[in-house]
Amino acid sequence: MSDDNSYDAIVIGAGISGLLSALVLSKKGKRVLIVDKESFIGGMCRSYDVEGYMVDTGPHVITRLDSGPLKELMDKYFDVVPSFVPHGTYHVRINESVKPFPWSVRDWMLFDLLPLEDRSLMMKTAFDIVYMLSVGKDLSRVSIADVVPRNLSRVTTSFLDYLSHFMLGTSVNDAPISRFVDRKEYNRDKLNENNSLNIPYVGRLYNLLIGGKPSDQMYPKGGIQKIVDSIKISLPKNAHINLNENLISIDVESSQKKGQAVQKVCGIKTDKNEYKCDTVIYSGFPNELPEIIKHDLPVEYVQNMRNIEQVKSLTVWLGLEKEVFTEQGSEMWVSPDPSGLHTWVVPTSNFDPYLAPKGSQLVGFAFIVPENIPQRELRDRALDTIFTTMPELENCVDMIHHQELVPEKACWSINSGFSDVVTPVKNLYCVGSSTVKRSMGLTRSAYSVLRMMNQMAIDRNGI
């Protein structure tokens, strides 16, 4: 095998977490190969043209851009940094009423989309959570359903269900409370060896009770593709991308160290070639790893991988002939009907008018996919939800585009599996939204890349 097929590191997957990993490693002088089965880079983080409208792969809002993980990566490794536009206000729509999302205690008590009695009961629940934090209770094993009162109204339980599904991809029965008391200050938060956070409860208390409208949530001007374009421009010449190449296996070799067997990654096979390397970074679906690694893995690791549940969504993009959504921000449509669909609505052309033809508006409607609903039926129900909620939209539609997506590679659920950056194979690491229980989407992927770099330093992996 020639030296042309030998690399310091191989990154499997050219999605955002794979690209960020390759950027960091190549900027540190490593010879890096990125392999992806698709004909494009970006994965769930890209944009493309549909009838003159520039649609993203699902609606995106980038969080924690003041001091969070993506900001750190951009500051250190991007040669070109995208321009970002403030997200604006989150609004909640229940039936025909719309109000700003309640970020603080005062906002919550005035949030009259929910009954006053429910809001009072939920405030008591908030103080119960504060107490649990103060005595050091592990809230990653406590679900929303475990702590909320049983006698809440249907509209309030629907609101909580909405938050659970869109923030974690699961129901209130499996949604851990720890997700909802997470705070944004990144520089003070340190991931420990258990892939969790050491955050003093006082900081969480502040976030839970005082809160405040977030000012660090942005949208990239020009569409989500601009982040991918910036990474591609920033990749040095020692980083190579091979597209349309399917991974067949991750190869492992065994050795003895101090009398114990050690399994170490040594290369990969694709449908086009074989490559040798010192390190592999895998950014694909973690539940596929047991079939890809051609070596026996610990039974508990394999079982955990197979228990991972993915988040699936449908996005309906509408091109409108006129501006209907006048405010910069997004709307949460909560359906009190148990058979209804919750919806997140993001008019992206309000952030950048050039994403739509002149005089038109581009709006994304995201739905968490219920189980066992055929694609055609789901699409029909989604459109019915949109036009029933806002009938005025139906008469000004210029373009309709559907996307079936997997926005998160793992539900953040108490009772399902979840991956980690670390694997049982030496110098094989995982990155992406299935590896760090922090934030969501692109921000979670950026957290995972930083944690991978920290782990490589701990492993003394030459980084």
Image (cartoon, rainbow, N blue to C red):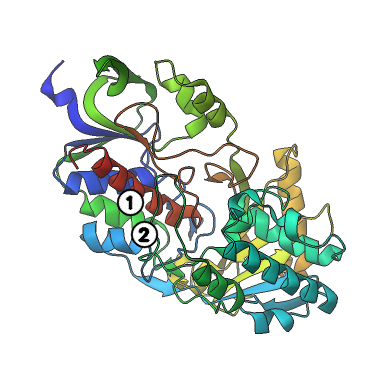
Residue 172 visible, this angle: yes
Q: Residue at x 79, y 61 (%)?
A: 157
Give the residue type at disc 1: Leu
Give the residue type at disc 2: Pro
Q: Answer few, some or many: residues within 10 Å of disc 2's Cα (few below 14, many 20 plus, some between 14 and 19).
A: many
Quadrant of residue 118 within the rendered picture: bottom right
Q: Nearer the viewer, residue 403 or 24?
A: 24
Give the Cα distance between marks 2 and 1: 7 Å
Residue 443 sits above or below residue 265 on the image: below
Q: Nearer the viewer, residue 119 or 36?
A: 119
Q: Answer few, some or many: residues within 10 Å of disc 1's Cα (few below 14, many 20 plus, some between 14 and 19).
A: many
Q: Is residue 235 left or right of residue 406?
A: left
Residue 345 sits above or below residue 415 on the image: below
Q: Is residue 54 left or right of residue 8?
A: right
Quick one: quadrant of the N terminus? top left
Quadrant of residue 90 within the rendered picture: bottom right
Q: Which residue is mark 1?
A: 450
Q: Which residue is mark 2?
A: 69
State how many labels appear.
2
Callout 2 secondary element: helix
> Circles 2 and 1: CB distance less than 8 Å?
yes
Q: Position of residue 99 (x, y in %)?
A: 70, 79
Quick one: quadrant of the C terminus? top left
Mark number, residue 11: none
Q: Is residue 386 left or right of residue 282?
A: right
Callout 1 secondary element: helix
